[in-house]
């Protein structure tokens, strides 16, 4: 995977920021994204590349940036000013986090976890609550990876209904989706868990 780069792009009268994965660019836009574009296959792709229905924008936080988690449908979406700008498949727990409104309180490029069959690395971790059973941080992150390079689940199975509950509590994302979410969301942004 390349370097995550923020680039300002003029489109008509508007100036948008785009996240690109590739070689670093000498002059990048400072700060976080102001209006992320839906880019790549991750936009609206479900498990195994299948399309998922467009989410309801009425569920978006009205903060500048935010995210929505729908555990029942095993998907999440990113919002910008109340508009859905990207949606993605997830693998989550079935019993946490509870439906509600949460505030992002921490971000880590990488952190570790002792949950699951063996210790793992969680890339692009965005924490928004704590577990109701053990108090561990819960957030978005890329599918856990082990020291030997293997993943906790194949990437094409993220979003598969039969894997609902495979996570201990966090919201697993494909690596490109996790990197994009990490680049857009920041401490103080809201996460709405709707199911």
Image: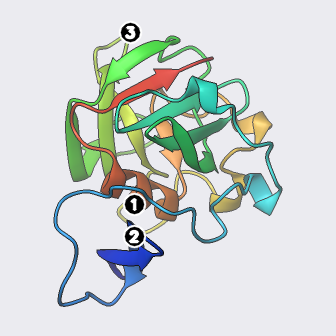
Q: Is residue 81 above or below residue 32?
A: above
Pointer 1 local density, CA inside 10 Å: few below 14, some 14–19, many at least 20: many
Query: Which residue corresponds to the image point at 22% horizontal and 72% vertical from the top-left?
Result: 29
The residue indicated by pointer 1 is 179
| Residues at marks 3 and 1, CA–CA distance in whole angstroms | 28 Å
Query: Which residue corresponds to the image point at 77% horizontal and 36% vertical from the top-left?
Result: 161
Residue 160 percent across, percent down from the top left: 75, 43
Question: Which element carries disc 2, helix, strand or loop?
Answer: strand
Question: Which element carries disc 3, helix, strand or loop?
Answer: loop
**Colour style of the rendered protein structure:** rainbow
Quadrant location of the C terminus in the rendered image: top right
The residue indicated by pointer 3 is 133
The residue indicated by pointer 2 is 19
Disc 3 and disc 2 in contact, CB within 8 angstroms = no
Query: Which residue corresponds to the image point at 18% horizontal and 59% vertical from the top-left?
Result: 31
Quadrant location of the N terminus in the rendered image: bottom left
| Residues at marks 3 and 2, CA–CA distance in whole angstroms | 36 Å
């Amino acid at each position: 995977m390349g370097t995550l780069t923020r680039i300002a792009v003029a489109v008509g009268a508007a100036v948008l920021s785009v996240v690109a994965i590739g070689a670093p660019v000498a002059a990048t836009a400072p700060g976080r994204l102001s209006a992320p574009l839906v880019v790549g296959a991750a936009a609206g792709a479900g498990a195994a590349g299948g399309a998922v229905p467009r989410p309801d924008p009425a569920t978006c936080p009205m903060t500048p940036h935010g995210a929505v988690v729908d555990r029942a449908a095993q998907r999440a979406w990113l919002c910008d000013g109340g508009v859905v700008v990207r949606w993605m498949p997830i693998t989550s727990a079935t019993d946490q986090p509870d439906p509600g409104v949460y505030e992002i309180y921490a971000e880590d490029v990488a952190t570790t976890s002792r949950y699951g069959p063996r210790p793992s690395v969680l890339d692009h971790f965005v924490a928004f609550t704590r577990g109701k059973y053990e108090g561990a941080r819960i957030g978005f992150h890329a599918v856990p990876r082990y020291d030997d390079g293997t993943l906790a689940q194949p990437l094409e199975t993220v979003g598969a209904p039969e894997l609902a509950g495979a996570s201990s509590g966090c919201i697993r994302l494909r690596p490109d989706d996790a990197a994009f979410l990490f680049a857009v969301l920041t401490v103080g942004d809201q996460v709405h868990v709707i199911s």
